[in-house]
Image: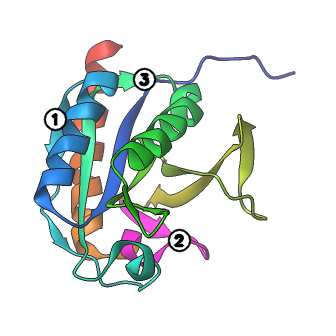
């Protein structure tokens, strides 16, 4: 019989798609109040992998990723997703009687062997957590690199994103070594 072990803490990340620097700065400040300081930022780059958000958010969207300094328990992922959904709504604008997001915030966590993302949508490869939130492994870390899975979003396979995730993993591994 296997023994139950408490998993190692994980490093929270958020991918953000946004329309303007002001909303990004506001979101980052609010996230830091709730989740602690951000220790790693990716570069900001155009979000061109899909037009999925254009109808709601407009065109000329930008993408950035952040990682949070404090390691957390993986069980917090559903709480963080609910927090980011609320923040998206609070930062939205009402246009013709409808809320239009100005920022999309996708939380997840990184640990030694994988990147896990949160979602409000169920699908065959997602596992229910709680409070209407699901999780999926988006990338696995094998053979000293991040490898996509059949459902991995194209932007998470982008070399710029993978470069950011490698930096985050390096910092995370050092943090785990120091905690042990």
Q: Is residue 27 left or right of residue 130?
A: left
Q: Are marks 2 and 3 in contact (CB under 8 Å)?
A: no
Find disc 1 in the rendering and name its residue. Answer: 39
Quarter where residue 62 is shown: bottom left
Residue situated furthest top in the rendering = 180
Instruction: Provide residue 161's location: percent of width, then percent of height.
Output: 28, 65
Considering depth in this image, is 121 or 26 the residue closer to the camera?
Answer: 26
Find disc 3 in the rendering and name its residue. Answer: 72
Q: Residue at x 12, y 58 (%)?
A: 21
Q: CA gap, disc 3 to disc 1?
A: 14 Å
Q: Earlier in the sequence, mark 3 or mark 1?
A: 1
Q: Is residue 109 left or right of residue 14?
A: right
Q: Crowdedness of circle 3 by 10 Å Cα count: few (<14), some, many (20+)? A: some
- The stretch in magenta equals 145-156
Q: Residue at x 40, y 49 (%)?
A: 88
Instruction: Provide residue 110's location: percent of width, then percent of height.
Output: 41, 43
Give the numbered dot on residue 152: 2
Residue situated furthest right in the rendering = 1
Q: Residue at x 14, y 65 (%)?
A: 44
Q: Crowdedness of circle 1 by 10 Å Cα count: few (<14), some, many (20+)? A: few
Give the numbered dot on residue 110: none
Q: Are marks 3 and 1 in contact (CB under 8 Å)?
A: no
Q: CA gap, disc 2 to disc 3?
A: 24 Å
Considering depth in this image, is 126 or 1 the residue closer to the camera?
Answer: 126
Q: Earlier in the sequence, mark 2 or mark 1?
A: 1
Q: Is residue 107 left or right of residue 15?
A: right
Q: Secondary structure at mark 3?
A: strand
120 to 109, vertically: above or below: below
Q: Secondary structure at mark 1?
A: strand
Q: Secondary structure at mark 2?
A: loop
């Amino acid at each position: 019989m296997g023994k139950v072990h408490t998993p190692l803490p994980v490093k929270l990340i958020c991918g953000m798609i946004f329309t303007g620097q002001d909303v990004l700065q506001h979101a980052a400040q609010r996230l830091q109040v709730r989740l602690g300081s951000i220790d790693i930022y990716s570069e900001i780059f155009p979000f061109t992998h899909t037009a999925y958000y254009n109808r709601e958010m407009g065109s000329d969207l930008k993408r950035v990723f952040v990682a949070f300094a404090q390691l957390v328990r993986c069980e917090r992922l559903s709480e963080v997703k609910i927090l980011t959904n609320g923040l998206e709504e609070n930062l939205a604008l009402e246009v013709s009687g409808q809320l239009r997001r100005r920022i999309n915030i996708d939380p997840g966590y990184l640990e030694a062997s994988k990147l896990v993302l949160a979602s409000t949508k169920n699908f065959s490869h997602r596992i229910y957590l709680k409070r209407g939130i699901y999780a999926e492994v988006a990338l696995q870390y094998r053979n000293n690199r991040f490898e996509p899975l059949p459902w991995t979003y194209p932007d998470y396979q982008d070399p710029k994103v993978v470069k950011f995730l490698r930096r985050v993993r390096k910092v995370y591994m050092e943090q785990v070594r120091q905690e042990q």
